[in-house]
Amino acid sequence: MSDYEEIRGNLIGMLEELNDRLSKITDDVKHTAEPPEKDFAEQAVQAENDEVLDFLGNRARTEIAQIKDAIARIDSGHYGICQSCGEPIAAARLKALPYSDLCIKCASQQGC
Ligand SMILES: [Zn+2]
């Protein structure tokens, strides 16, 4: 259990950072959602920004979900096991990608 104490701490740190980033992104989106009183060119730029922010927001949310999953797996004792083949995930991979739930073999088969 305590084997993953350090990783758990790292994951929580990542989670806090992502939540922070996400709330900044959300603030930006809110800011650009003000009543339009700008010219068309500016609105076009804003629409583009919104798309980028949407993308970043979605990515952050996906990562947050993966990190929360990983923490839950640590707590339930299922961490470090490939969700696809059930083999242990290499420690080096867990270090590089602490919220990974697939071993290298399965991840490369799935193309990610
Ligand atoms: Zn696997």
Image: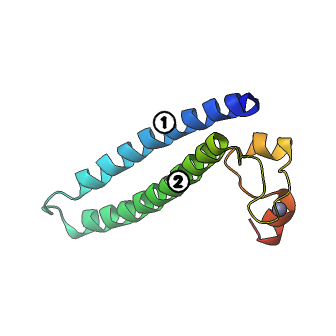
Q: Quadrant of the N terminus?
A: top right
Residue depicted at 52% across the width and 49% down the height: 64
**Left or right of residue 40, residue 100 in this image:** right
Residue depicted at 87% across the width and 63% down the height: 105
**Left or right of residue 78, residue 87 in this image:** right
The residue wearing badge 1 is: 16
- Mark closer to the chain start, 1 or 2: 1
Residue 84 is situated, as x and y percent measured from the top left of the image, at: 77, 66
- Of residue 2 and residue 108, the one placed in the foreground of this image is 2
Secondary structure under the numbered disc 1 in the rendered image: helix
Residue 104 is situated, as x and y percent measured from the top left of the image, at: 84, 58
Q: Quadrant of residue 21?
A: top left
Residue depicted at 73% across the width and 61% down the height: 83
Amino acid type indicated by mark 2: Ala
The residue wearing badge 2 is: 65
Q: Quadrant of the C terminus?
A: bottom right
Q: Mark 1 or mark 2, which is nearer to you? A: 2
Amino acid type indicated by mark 1: Glu
Task: State which image quarter holds ligand 1.
Answer: bottom right
User: Cα distance, mark 1 to mark 2?
Assistant: 12 Å
Which numbered tag is attached to residue 39?
Answer: none
Coloration of the structure image: rainbow
Residue 5 is situated, as x and y percent measured from the top left of the image, at: 68, 29
Residue 22 is situated, as x and y percent measured from the top left of the image, at: 42, 47
